Amino acid sequence: MSQKIWVTGDAVVDLIPDGENHYLRCAGGAPANVAVGVARLGSPSAFIGRVGNDPLGQFMQQTLAAENVDTTHMVLDPQHRTSTVVVGLDNGERSFTFMVNPSADQFLQTSDLPPFQAGEWLHCCSIALINNPSREATFEAIRRIKVAGGFSPSIQIYVNPSGTVWMK
């Protein structure tokens, strides 16, 4: 029985201030961070999602692979760019300015999903539920994993305060 933990959602390149006129490029996005954390803890980890077929998307794919995250289902999207965010660090508080919208992660397709196996788990984040087609692909992943294994949501209410997305 496989114990792989699949993670779906956004993989984001964070641009963090590094001096007055420089930014440090870092792999980010909560789902990508979860996939790396699972791998660092010694469990099989895999990422499901889309990044642009651009230098930043290739950076994300290479970075996750170097952390022993299976990136077989990380699609390099030829039509959309990788999600990129400038991180502000004012008075010890973070702020985020997203530079690409819509980004590749919002275009996840059901055809991007793996064939889940018994005993596997899926962790998904709420950002993937904002827009179609990623919303429907994520709901399909949830339906499939419930048959095969388990499901772990990461719901951030500020994304949809009315709660209408969570009713499904």
Image: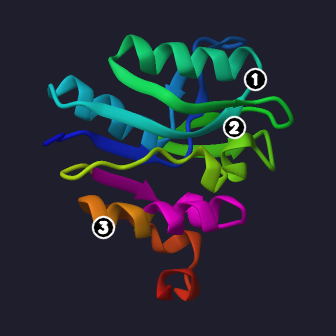
Give the CA distance from mark 3 to mark 2: 31 Å
Closer to the N terminus: mark 2 or mark 1?
1
SS of the residue under disc 2? loop
As helix, strand or loop, the secondary structure at mark 1 comes to: loop
126 and 117: which one is in front?
Answer: 117
Q: Quadrant of residue 135?
A: bottom right
Bounds of the magenta segment:
121-141
Q: Which mark is residue 20?
A: none
> Which secondary structure, mark 3?
helix
Nearer to us: label 3 or label 2: 3
Give amino acid for label 1: Asn
Q: Residue at x 33, y 29 (%)?
A: 36
Q: Which residue is mark 3?
A: 147
Q: Which mark is residue 83?
A: 2
Using the rendered image of the protein, determine whether residue 17 is visible from the camera's viewpoint: no
Q: Residue at x 50, y 85 (%)?
A: 168
Residue 52 coordinates in the image, percent (x, y):
74, 29
Q: Which residue is mark 1?
A: 53
Measure the C-alpha gap from mark 1 to mark 3. Answer: 32 Å
Measured as percent of width and height from the top left, residue 15 is found at 63, 25
Could you tell which of marks 3 and 2 lies nearer the N-terminus?
2
Observer-nearest of 43 and 92:
43
Residue density around tag 3, few if under 14, some if 14–19, many if 20 or more, within 10 Å:
few
Residue 128 magenta-drawn? yes
Q: Is residue 44 left or right of residue 153?
A: left
Question: Disc 2 vs disc 1: Cβ atoms closer than 8 Å?
Answer: no
